[in-house]
């Protein structure tokens, strides 16, 4: 049976027939953005993640690591122990989060990788609710 999907800024909305066409189920998925960056140590990671959460730029930040990175830098191959942070944010706040990481990051050229994922309905709603811009009265 065919699945129809419509895209909007909030995500994909689809309708699909189930069984013999007697039951129709509405499928709603909200897009979530994952954004990854690497920091030099736990203190820098804690500061960046806490500040982003306080500003509601992310609903959740997962600390990954420690990790060991090898990379080209200024004509040499370097190696260092680092901490990765994985931010979960909404499509609406992704650009702001990227700019925030860029300006607050201790590295001159921070790693900022992002990709859009399809989340479960409940998780997507939670991410979008937690990353609403605060209302100033």
Image: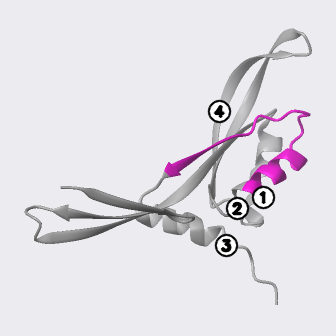
Q: Is residue 47 visible?
A: no
Measured in 3D between alpha carbons, the distance from the residue under mark 2 to the one under mark 1, in whole angstroms, is: 5 Å
Question: What scheme was used to colour the molecule?
Answer: one colour
Q: Which residue is mark 3?
A: 132
Q: Is residue 128 visible?
A: yes
Q: Residue at x 92, y 15 (%)?
A: 74
In primary-sequence order, the first of circles 4 and 1 is 4
In primary-sequence order, the first of circles 3 and 1 is 1
Q: Which circle, 4 or 1, is nearer the viewer?
A: 1
Q: Which residue is mark 1?
A: 96
Asked whether 2 or 122 is in front, the reply is: 2
Asked whether 66 or 48 is in front, the reply is: 48
In primary-sequence order, the first of circles 2 and 4 is 4
Q: Which residue is mark 2?
A: 93
Q: Is residue 58 above or below residue 48?
A: below
Q: Which residue is mark 4?
A: 65
Q: Which circle, 2 or 4, is nearer the viewer?
A: 2
Q: Would you call the spot at circle 3 few (<14 residues within 10 Å), some (14-19), or many (20 or more)?
A: some
- Label 3: which secondary element: loop
Q: Would you call the spot at circle 1 few (<14 residues within 10 Å), some (14-19), or many (20 or more)?
A: few
Q: Position of residue 7 (x, y in %)?
A: 48, 61
Q: Position of residue 83 (x, y in %)?
A: 72, 34
Residues at discs 4 and 1 in contact (Cβ within 8 Å): no
Residues at discs 2 and 1 in contact (Cβ within 8 Å): yes
Measured in 3D between alpha carbons, the distance from the residue under mark 4 to the one under mark 3, in whole angstroms, is: 29 Å
> Does residue 115 belong to the magenta stretch?
yes
């Amino acid at each position: 049976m065919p699945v129809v999907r419509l895209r909007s800024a909030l995500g994909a909305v689809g309708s699909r027939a189930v069984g013999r066409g007697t039951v129709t189920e509405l499928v709603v998925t909200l897009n979530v953005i994952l954004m990854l960056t690497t920091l030099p140590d736990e203190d820098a990671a804690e500061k960046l993640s806490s500040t982003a959460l306080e500003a509601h730029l992310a609903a959740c930040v997962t600390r990954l690591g420690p990790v060991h990175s090898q990379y080209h830098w200024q004509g040499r191959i370097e190696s260092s122990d680092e901490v990765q942070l994985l931010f979960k944010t909404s499509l609406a706040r992704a650009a702001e989060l990227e700019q925030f990481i860029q300006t607050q990051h201790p590295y001159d050229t921070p790693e900022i990788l992002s990709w859009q994922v399809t989340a479960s309905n409940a998780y997507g709603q939670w991410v979008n609710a937690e990353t609403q811009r605060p209302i100033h009265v």
